[in-house]
Image (cartoon, grey):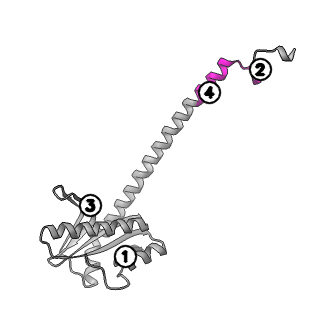
Amino acid sequence: MGDMQTKTDYPRGLDFEQVWAALMETREQQKETDRQIKEIGKRFGDFTNRFGEVVEYMIAPNLQDKLYDMGLDFQTVSSNFKVNDHKNNIHFQIDVFLQNGDTAMLVEIKTKLTISDINEHIKRMEKMRMFADLRGDKRHFLGAVAGVVIESDEREYALNNGFYLIEPSGETFNITPPHNKPKEW
């Protein structure tokens, strides 16, 4: 009799329609789970962006004074300085831009500083030099990177590439000059 059976037996006596309905319900639950995961990812991204902004606001106000104590006198400080030169296709943003008549410093601030962030800042420095040259701006440009979390490899990479390194220390922050002469762009 087992050989002649044509109807499939489902566990617990379920028929095809019940199994199909359960699959459709599972699919809808998966869609809702995916939506919730995307929402969590968006909120986490918002959180890390906000955290980065907090770090920026902690560093920017005192940065000018700390650099002055190191012999670098910048009279003006701007946050979120943007360059959009459509004619020459040069576009970039600087977290903190300090300047005087002879020198300017571009500071990139990250929550967790990576080698990739440092490489991007090198490219940003090169774009700044190109933008300045097109305008006849002969100032020297210095670079600095800041981070809440900086691993030793990233620390050494930044300092070896001529950047000042800004990192937290207690309730304030420290600035470490590059290992050799600061690189000028």
**Residue 104 drawn at (x, y percent):** 21, 74
Residue at image x 39%, y 75%?
A: 158
Instruction: Kindly check if marks 2 and 1 are in contact, taking CB atoms under 8 A apart as contact.
Output: no
User: What residue sits right under mark 3 in the picture?
Assistant: 93
User: What residue sits right under mark 1 in the picture?
Assistant: 165
Q: Nearer the viewer, mark 1 or mark 3?
A: 3
Secondary structure type for disc 4:
helix
* Mark closest to the chain's N terminus, 1 or 3: 3
Secondary structure type for disc 3:
strand
Instruction: Kindly check if marks 2 and 4 are in contact, taking CB atoms under 8 A apart as contact.
Output: no
Task: Mark 4: give few (<14), some (14-19) or many (20+) Cα within 10 Å.
Answer: few
Q: Which quadrant holds the N terminus? A: top right
Label drawn at residue 9: 2
* Mark closest to the chain's N terminus, 2 or 3: 2
Q: Is residue 54 above or below residue 138?
A: above
**View extreme (right): residue:** 1
Secondary structure type for disc 2:
loop
Going by the numbered disc 1, the residue's amino acid type is Leu
Give the CA distance from mark 4 to mark 3: 49 Å
**Residue 80 drawn at (x, y percent):** 25, 61
Going by the numbered disc 3, the residue's amino acid type is Gln
Q: Which residues are magenta?
A: 10-26
* Count of numbered circles on the image: 4
Task: Mark 3: give few (<14), some (14-19) or many (20+) Cα within 10 Å.
Answer: some
User: What residue sits right under mark 4 in the picture?
Assistant: 23
* Mark closest to the chain's N terminus, 4 or 1: 4
Left or right relative to 17: residue 121 = left
Q: Is residue 34 above or below residue 135?
A: above
